[in-house]
Image (cartoon, rainbow, N blue to C red):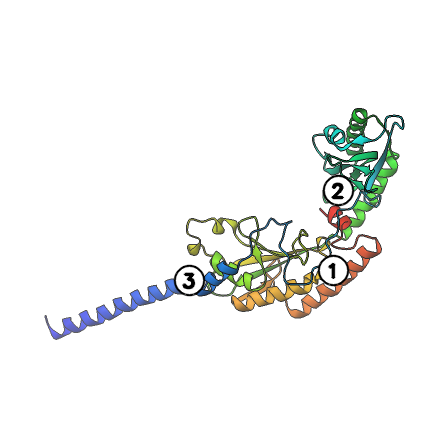
């Protein structure tokens, strides 16, 4: 072999090696980022249990007393009084439970029956072992499915009458047209004041694996939700809805090898009416979004992909304060049981 041929062979080998090295480097660069092994082990040891989205462990924040599930309220419910025969005596909880309809809805609206407990002197859902001196039945005036209509009201009447027939009670119903008109007014108010905020965090360069997302989200206080691809920031009291929901591709989370799943965006969601103002949900959402974007080399955007600046966040926060005030003036403060029922 001549000197020229040897030289060409060496150059060719170097070029080939360079191509292989470049390919390997490109592959590493484009591979989804993985969770740090040591940190993952620590996170696994310290990770809180998995909860459903309506049942969360309390965080390290001070624990206010959880709100007791309220009785029906005429502010958002149609309520019918069910009078018992005074000569028949009280009705047992077992009899009331057996008389309840199979479904607790009238159309798309929640339907409920409550009894006045002789011992506790409180309205409550019928309980075995208790005795009740009177009952009331109710149907919700509005929810995110819309206002109570005439057909749903009629179904409410039929279900209530069937319950009364079984326990020997006489119902007294409000006027249907008045209640349907009240439902429409409440629905109009709710529709005009229903806020659900969403931020998207998009990768600037390298994509992310599910483990990498989970590890970084855990540093911000998020824990695993019941649904794959979802994490939640728990409320300060057990049993309340989450303050924030973080979501990513559920298919990637369920992949045979999640480490090879590549994602380029995650979302943060705040359902304003479901979370108490005292939780400072928007401030925590904004802080979590920017912290995640910083740690994961991403950018915070709106649903249309437009970057969100700090000044824009300030405007949103100011508008939310006005919304909180309006809800409170209507006795539907965000995070209260009535608000959670109405905006559901």
State the residue position of label 2: 146
State the residue position of label 3: 30
- Earlier sequence position, callout 1 versus callout 3: 3
Q: Where is residue 287 in the image (x, y as percent from the top left)?
A: 63, 66
In the rendered image, the vertical position of residue 338 relative to residue 108, given as above or below: below
SS label for mark 2: strand
In the rendered image, the vertical position of residue 262 relative to residue 91, given as above or below: below
State the residue position of label 1: 277
Q: Position of residue 61 (x, y in %)?
A: 66, 63
Q: In which quarter of the image is the N terminus?
A: bottom left
SS label for mark 3: helix
Question: Furthest-left residue in view?
Answer: 1
Q: Position of residue 237 (x, y in %)?
A: 68, 56
- At x 10%, y 72%, the residue is 2
* Residue 307 in view here: no
* Residue 19 in view here: yes
Q: In which quarter of the image is residue 173?
A: top right
SS label for mark 1: helix
Which is nearer the eye, 135 or 295? Answer: 135
């Amino acid at each position: 072999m001549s000197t020229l041929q040897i030289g060409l062979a060496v150059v060719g080998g170097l070029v080939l090696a360079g191509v292989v090295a470049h390919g390997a480097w490109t592959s590493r660069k484009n591979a989804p980022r993985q969770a740090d092994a040591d940190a993952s082990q620590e996170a696994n040891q310290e990770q809180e249990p998995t909860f459903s989205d309506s049942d969360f462990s309390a965080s390290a924040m001070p624990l206010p007393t959880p709100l007791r599930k309220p009785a029906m309220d005429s502010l958002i419910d149609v309520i019918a009084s069910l009078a018992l025969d005074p000569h028949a005596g009280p009705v047992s909880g077992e009899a009331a439970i057996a008389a309840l309809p199979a479904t607790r809805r009238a159309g798309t609206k929640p339907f409920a029956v409550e009894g006045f407990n002789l011992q506790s002197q409180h309205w409550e859902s019928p309980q075995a072992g208790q005795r009740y001196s009177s009952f009331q039945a109710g149907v919700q005036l509005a929810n995110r499915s819309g206002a109570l209509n005439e057909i749903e009201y009629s179904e409410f009447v039929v279900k209530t009458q069937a319950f009364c027939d079984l326990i020997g009670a006489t119902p007294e119903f409000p006027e249907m047209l008045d209640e349907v008109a009240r439902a429409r007014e409440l629905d109009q108010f709710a529709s005009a004041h229903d806020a659900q905020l969403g931020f998207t965090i998009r990768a600037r360069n390298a994509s992310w694996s599910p483990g990498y997302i989970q590890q970084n989200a855990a540093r911000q206080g998020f824990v695993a939700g019941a649904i794959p691809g979802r994490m939640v920031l728990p409320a300060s009291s057990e049993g309340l809805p989450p303050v924030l929901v973080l979501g990513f591709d559920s298919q990637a989370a369920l992949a045979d090898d999640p480490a090879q799943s590549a994602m380029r965006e995650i979302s943060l969601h705040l359902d304003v009416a479901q979370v108490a103002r005292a939780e400072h949900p928007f401030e925590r959402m904004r802080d979590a979004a920017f912290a995640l974007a910083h740690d994961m080399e991403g950018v915070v955007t709106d649903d249309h992909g437009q970057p969100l600046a700090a000044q824009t966040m300030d405007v949103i926060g100011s508008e939310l304060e006005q919304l909180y005030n309006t809800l409170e003036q209507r006795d539907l403060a965000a995070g209260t049981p009535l608000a959670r029922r109405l905006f559901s």
